[in-house]
Image (spheres, helix red, strand yellow):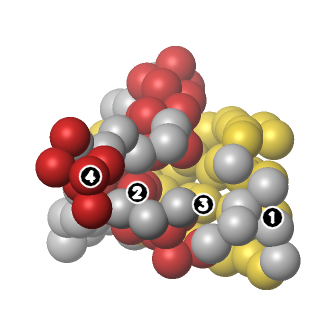
Amino acid sequence: MQIKTIFQEAIADSEDVLTIAIITHVASHCILARQLMDVLGKPPIHSDLEILGGDDTWTICWSQPQMTLEAATAAINQALAPPVLLPSMRETSTP
């Protein structure tokens, strides 16, 4: 998975910003969603997280107070990084 583009829009009368990221080469939107939730956390009551798409291209939109574009990009990159297997997981995983 990789970021095709990421940008932000201000939300009128709010300190929140809307971050929109387009992710390509998505093999599993379920894995993408789980990894995003691990990094971004569960959205608070007044925030939104939407994952829209199909095939291998998905759009992620979320609102969050005062998140810089650099911080949003770093969070998405962290979510897209391959999961690290613990030693005990490597021993029991099958190719």
Q: Taking 25 as reference, is 56 above or below it? A: below
Asked if residue 13 shows in the view, the reply is no
Neighbourhood count class around disc 4 (C-alpha, 10 Å): few under 14, some 14–19, many 20 upward: few
Per the model, the C-alpha gap separating discs 1 and 2 is 16 Å
Q: Taking 79 as reference, is 24 above or below it? A: below
Amino acid type of the residue tagged 1 in the rendering = Thr
For label 1, the SS is: strand
Q: Which image quarter: residue 84? A: top left
Question: Is there a contact, CB below 8 Å, between mark 3 and mark 1?
Answer: no
Residue at the spot of label 2:
35
N-term mark: 1 or 4:
1
Question: Is there a contact, CB below 8 Å, between mark 1 and mark 2?
Answer: no
Residue at the spot of label 3:
60
Amino acid type of the residue tagged 3 in the rendering = Ile
Question: Is 86 displayed left or right of 11 in the figure?
Answer: left
Looking at the rendered image, the disc whose residue lies closer to the viewer, 1 or 4, is: 4
Q: Which image quarter: residue 2? A: top right
Residue at the spot of label 1:
57
